Image (spheres, rainbow, N blue to C red):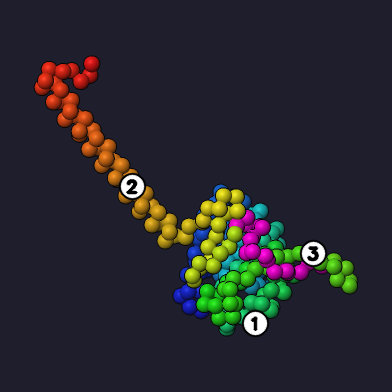
């Protein structure tokens, strides 16, 4: 479970924003659910705060077994804190690296140990003494190649922006606010049309009173 309300809110908003963004594609977004990665070994599991898996049927699961689905998560987010720091940048980082998770993002909403709050890693092939290996390297400019999004710290949350058009992916509260604004604008437009039609009818009536046919 999330440590604080801020951590929980960051998890839920990240989940919903990415779920809506990927709606209609062969992908799923899961949060705080077990990822099983070794068949026959039920203890080989981890529960990422948010994970994005491509190439699978959309929708929720009770848990995720990578060997049954045929895919490992492509992107994982951990909403981190001082209490989970060692695990998030230690065991989990090495595990996700080993599993082949392409991008790993750490978000520290309280800024307890990541001064900039957001830190990303991308899997890259590097040369070592024993040959090429895949290792996590820091992500520059907070750009997610796999998601095609730019990530930005916005208070206690991550803001997500499309790389193709710069459009922000709205969180649920922003969506609700935008809907309210749209509803007000539509109502104002309807009222303006009603008044215009009323004025036109009044003018037509005056013209008729003067013996002028407004339809001619």
Q: Which residue is mark 1?
A: 86
Q: Which residue is found at the position 57% from the left and 82% from the top? A: 82
Q: Is residue 61 left or right of residue 133?
A: left
Kind of element beneath mark 3: strand
Q: Is residue 147 magenta?
A: yes
Q: Find the distance from the CA under tag 1 to the CA under tag 2.
A: 50 Å
Identify the mark at residue 71; answer none if there is no mark: none
Residue nearest the viewer, comparing 97 with 66: 97
Give the class, few, some or many, for how many residues have Cα within 10 Å of label 1's Cα (few <14, many ≥20).
few
Q: Which mark is residue 125?
A: 3
Inspect this view and state whether residue 33 appears. no
* Point 62% across, 55% down: residue: 148
Along the viewing direction, whichever of 142 and 71 lies nearer the viewer:
142
Write the residue at 81% across / 67% down. Answer: 126
Q: CA distance from mark 2 to mark 3?
A: 52 Å
Q: Which residues are magenta?
A: 133-149
């Amino acid at each position: 479970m999330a440590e604080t309300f801020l951590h929980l809110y960051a998890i839920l908003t990240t989940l919903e924003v990415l779920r809506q963004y990927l709606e209609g594609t062969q992908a799923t977004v899961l949060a705080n659910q077990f990822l099983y990665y070794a068949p026959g070994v039920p203890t080989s599991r981890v529960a990422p705060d948010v994970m994005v898996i491509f190439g699978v049927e959309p929708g929720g699961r009770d848990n995720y077994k990578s060997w049954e689905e045929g895919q490992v998560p492509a992107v994982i987010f951990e909403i981190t804190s001082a209490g989970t720091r060692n695990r998030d940048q230690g065991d989990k980082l090495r595990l996700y690296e080993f599993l082949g998770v392409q991008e790993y993002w750490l978000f520290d909403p309280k800024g307890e140990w990541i001064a900039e709050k957001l830190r990303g890693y991308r899997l890259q092939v590097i040369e070592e003494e024993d040959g090429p290996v895949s290792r996590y390297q820091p992500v520059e400019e907070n750009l997610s190649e796999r998601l095609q999004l730019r990530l930005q710290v916005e208070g206690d949350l991550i803001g997500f922006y499309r790389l193709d058009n710069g459009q922000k992916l709205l969180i649920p509260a922003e969506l609700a606010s935008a809907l309210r604004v749209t509803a007000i604008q539509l109502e104002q437009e309807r009222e303006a049309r009603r008044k215009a039609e009323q004025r036109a009818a009044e003018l037509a009536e005056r013209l008729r009173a003067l013996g002028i046919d407004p339809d001619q």
